[in-house]
Amino acid sequence: MAPPYPTQRPTDATHLPADEFDLPTELLNLPWIDSHTHAQTLSWADRERYSLAGCRAMVMVASGYHWTPYKPVTAADVRYLWDDAINRRRAIERNHFFEAGLALGAHTGVRIENPAELVGSMADYCGLDEVVAVGETGITPAQHVESWDLDAQFELVRAQMELADEHDLPVILHTPNATGEGPDYRPGVGLPGFELNTELAEEPVLTGENPALEAVEIDVDAAHEAGLAEERVVASHADPNNVDYLLGETDCYASFTVGYEWLTGVTAADVAAAIEEYGPERVLVETDCANVLDTDVFSVKRTILELYRLGIDIDDIRQVVFENPRSVYGLAD
Ligand SMILES: [Zn+2]
C-alpha cells in the first residue's frame, strides 16, 4: 500500500505500490574488467573516468596499425607500440588504481614488411608478467593502403597463436564486424568518428558471401594448426553475424564491443541475447576505446545497468563483465 500523501490531489506516487521495485544497488559497485581497450592512447581524463566508473582491471592492447605512421609497417614500428605500452603501463596503474595487463600482437590491417622478424622478437615479450594475451590479430578481409595476401596473413596469425600456446596465453582476435551501409557523406569528409583516411581502404583479399564470418573461421583454422585450444581464443568484436558460429560451433569466447554502437550497431541487447541463448560462460564485454575512434569509456558500465534492465541476472552480469575476463586473462586475482 502506498502511504497517504498530503498532496493536493493524487499523484503517481499515490497509485504505485511502495515496494514495487527492489533497487539493484550492488550493480553500482560491481567490479568490471575492460577485456579490450587501447587506453594507453586515451587522455589522462579518460583513464580517470575508468576508475570513477569502477573499472577494476583492463587489457591494454598494443598492436594496431592506427598508431604506426608508415605504411607498409615494419617489425620495428610494431615493437615501438609494444615498448610504448610497457613504458607507460605501471605509471597508468599508479595514477588510476586499476590493474592494466597488456596484449601485444601484430595486426594484419596493414601489410608488415618483415613479419618473421617481428614474431622472432615476440617470444621474449610473451614471457613478461604484465603480458596477459597475444593480440589483437586475425585475418583482415581488406587492408589499409596496400593489400596483404591471405597466405601471408594466415602465417602471421598462426605463428602468433603458436607463441601464445607456448606461453600459455590467450589470443585476442580482431574479428571483423559485418557493418551495414552507413549514411552517404559529402566527399572528402571521410568517416565521421573514425580519424583514419578511410578512402585508402584496398580492395578485399577475402571475397565471398560473408567475408567477416569467413575471416574468423580461418582464424579458428589457424588456431587448430597452431595447436592452440579454442578455449584460449577470445573473438573480439562479436556480433550477430558471428556469434552463432563462435558460441554454437566452437569453444571460443565471444567478446562484445559496446564502445561504438554508431559504427557496428552492437549494443547490450546483443550481449543479453547471447547470454540467453548460450549462457554466460563464454561471453565477455569490452569498450575497444581508442583515440582514433569515437568511443565510450563508460560503455561497459552502461552495459552492466542495461543488461539488468533486459532481465539478465546479476550473477550472470558479474560473470561476463568480471569473472570471465578475470579467469581468461588472470587479472584482478
Ligand atoms: Zn582494438
Image (cartoon, rainbow, N blue to C red):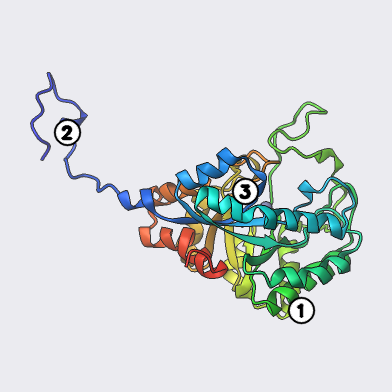
N-term mark: 3 or 2: 2
N-term mark: 1 or 2: 2
Answer whether residue 108 is visible to the viewer in this image: no
Disc 3 marks a residue whose amino acid type is Ala
What residue is pinned by disc 3? Answer: 39
Local secondary structure at mark 1:
helix
Residues at marks 1 and 2 touching, judged by CB atoms closer than 8 Å: no
Answer whether residue 197 is visible to the viewer in this image: yes
Q: Nearer the viewer, mark 3 or mark 2?
A: 3
For the N terminus, the image quarter is: top left
Say which of 138 and 177 sits in front. 138
Q: Nearer the viewer, mark 1 or mark 2?
A: 1
Disc 2 marks a residue whose amino acid type is His
**What residue appears at the point 56 percent right and 44 percent down from the top-left corner?**
47
Disc 1 C-beta below 8 A from ligand 1: no
| Residue 191 image offset from top left, x and y in percent | 74, 35
Q: CA distance from mark 3 to mark 2?
A: 47 Å
Disc 1 marks a residue whose amino acid type is Glu
Q: CA distance from mark 1 to mark 2?
A: 64 Å
Disc 3 C-beta below 8 A from ligand 1: no
Name of the residue lying farthest toward the top:
8
Q: Please determine whether, in this image, residue 26 is positioned above or below residue 155.
A: above
| Residue 84 image offset from top left, x and y in percent | 72, 53
Local secondary structure at mark 2:
helix
| Residue 295 image offset from top left, x and y in percent | 61, 41
**What residue appears at the point 84 percent right and 52 percent down from the top-left corner?**
143
Q: Please determine whether, in this image, residue 272 is positioned above or below residue 19.
A: below
What residue is pinned by disc 1? Answer: 225
Residues at marks 3 and 2 touching, judged by CB atoms closer than 8 Å: no
What residue is pinned by disc 2? Answer: 15
**What residue appears at the point 66 percent right and 61 percent down from the top-left corner?**
103
